[in-house]
Image: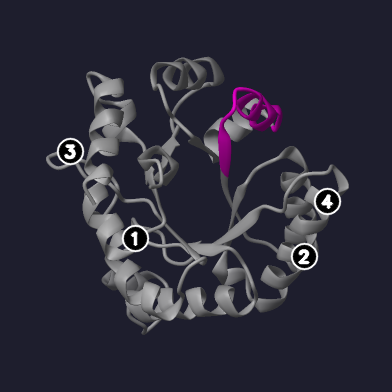
Amino acid sequence: MENPADKIILALDGMEKAEAFSMVSKLSGLKWVKVGLELFVSSGPEIISNFREDGLKVFLDLKFHDIPVTMSAACRKAAGFGAELITVHGCAGRKALEQANRAAIEGASLVGLPPPRLLVVTVLTSWEGKDIKDQLLINQSIQSRVQLFAKLSSELGLGGCICSPKEVRGLRSLCPLPFELVTPGVRLEGDPLNDQARVMTPSEAINEGASKLVIGRSITQALNPEDAFSKCCNQLERV
């Protein structure tokens, strides 16, 4: 049976380097950490190596979105640092995604590391259908847009996609394992939603077909983070 902790990626958003390592040290059995834009910009790429030296796997969530040559160069570098999961925006298009995936494989190979899995960002979990129509002038449902990017990333051989728990069930039927469905927007029952609009509890998201869960504030802002992490693991043991 898979260790429940293998399905939990701890989001270290809003933390400086020392605070992040202090938090990680409290959580016995933690396997994965998420390094997002804020922590990466404040601490630099060496934080990836620092976490890996402590035996942790790194989900580098920088959501690369640029022209193909720039995206591929960034993914090549990120793979060389040792990140196991790297996010890229589906909106960048087929050519950029294809070249970025190839570059990430090359970057890891150059330093003798296994290739990372690129995860395509579909629609951010802070967005709702009305936002897409009113602000982006795109007359397409969230579900249709998420499926479009998931199918594209699967066709191109990328590792998976990022989606809200609400889209997981439909995507799993389109994109079977080992394609990863990694879901932010996961909260313990009763926790505030903050800026997330489409959320579920850990057990609900896994039951829908999610591969891994990105969980931040439900653990990091809990009165007792270790108890909150254990509660998440216990939920997944019963799934």
Which residue corresponds to the image point at 46% horizontal and 67% vertical from the top-left?
122
Q: Quadrant of residue 97?
A: bottom right
Mark 2 neighbour class, 10 Å CA radius: few under 14, some 14 to 19, many 20 or more: some
Residue bearing the label numbered 2: 102
Q: Secondary structure at mark 2?
A: helix
Q: What are the residue bounds of the magenta stretch?
A: 45-59
Residue 187 forms part of the magenta stretch: no
> Which label lies toward us, 1 or 4?
4
**Residue 192, percent from left and from top:** 18, 40
Amino acid at circle 2: Arg
Q: Secondary structure at mark 4?
A: helix
Q: Is residue 218 left or right of residue 88?
A: left
Taking the view exactly as shown, the residue that stands out farthest to the left is 190
Residue bearing the label numbered 1: 164
175 or 150, which lies in front?
175
Residue bearing the label numbered 3: 191
Which residue corresponds to the image point at 73% horizontal and 47% vertical from the top-left?
79
